Image (spheres, rainbow, N blue to C red):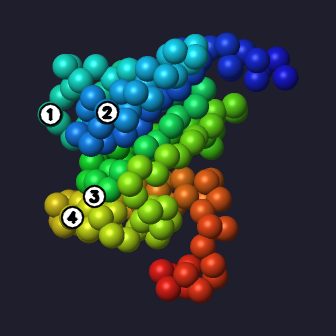
């Protein structure tokens, strides 16, 4: 019990927002951030001015994920096209598995949950593109992204969202 209390007290942020930045600048996520802050929830705010053009996650972002009590992932149609989003989601899922008290919440913004559960539509297209871009050099990375998407869907209870017949179509 004491270690759980210490773990919660060490958290720097109440929430980490995981989203495709190009989809939400100045809109939904900005409003969500303001509302969270307005009710006293300290959320990690990514500094877009300092954002690198490289498809890697900064140490600051990795630490922010680790130091957050919850992660809120906002899935949009083009979410899976961002390697940074997928890397962040992979890190979030690892933290949820290994850090007591850390939780993950999902928001489906103009995207069907089925796109995440069984990567279809824009999610399938984006993942296929990532596989082609990597040309066999790091296909394990794409598999980690697929696993993270599937784990997020499992955590959200999406298996219960669809009938057995719908799931069988995608298997």
Q: Residue 166 at what x, y percent from top left?
A: 55, 81
Q: Residues within 10 Å of mark 4 (few under 14, many from 20)?
A: few
Q: Residue 121 at what x, y percent from top left?
A: 33, 70
Looking at this view, is 43 or 91 the one in front?
A: 43
Alpha carbons under labels 4 and 3: distance apart: 13 Å
Query: Residue at (17%, 61%) from the top-left corner?
Result: 133
Q: Residue 115 at what x, y percent from top left?
A: 42, 65
SS at circle 2: loop
Alpha carbons under labels 3 and 2: distance apart: 34 Å
Q: Which residue is mark 3?
A: 138
Task: Please report whichever mark, 1 or 4, sits nearer to the chain's N-terminal start.
Answer: 1
In this rendering, position of residue 127 left or right of residue 15: left
Contact between marks 1 and 3 (CB within 8 A): the answer is no
Alpha carbons under labels 1 and 3: distance apart: 20 Å
Which one is in front in this view, the residue at disc 2 or the one at disc 1? Answer: 2
Looking at this view, is 80 or 88 the one in front?
A: 80
Q: Which residue is mark 1?
A: 53
């Amino acid at each position: 019990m004491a270690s759980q209390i210490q773990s919660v007290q060490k958290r720097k942020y109440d929430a980490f927002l995981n989203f495709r930045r190009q989809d939400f600048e100045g809109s939904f996520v900005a409003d969500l951030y303001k509302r969270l802050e307005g009710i006293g929830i300290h959320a990690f705010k990514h500094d877009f001015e300092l954002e690198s053009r490289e498809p890697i996650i900064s140490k600051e972002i990795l630490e922010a994920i680790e130091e957050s009590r919850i992660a809120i992932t906002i899935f949009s149609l083009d979410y899976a096209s961002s390697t940074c989003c997928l890397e962040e989601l992979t890190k979030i899922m690892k933290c949820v598995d290994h850090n007591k008290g850390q939780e993950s919440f999902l928001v489906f913004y103009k995207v069907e949950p089925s796109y995440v559960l069984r990567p279809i539509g824009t999610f399938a297209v984006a993942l296929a593109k990532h596989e082609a871009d990597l040309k066999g050099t790091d296909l394990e990375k794409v598999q980690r992204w697929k696993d993270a998407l599937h784990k997020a869907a499992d955590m959200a209870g999406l298996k219960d969202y669809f009938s057995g017949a719908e799931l069988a179509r995608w298997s």
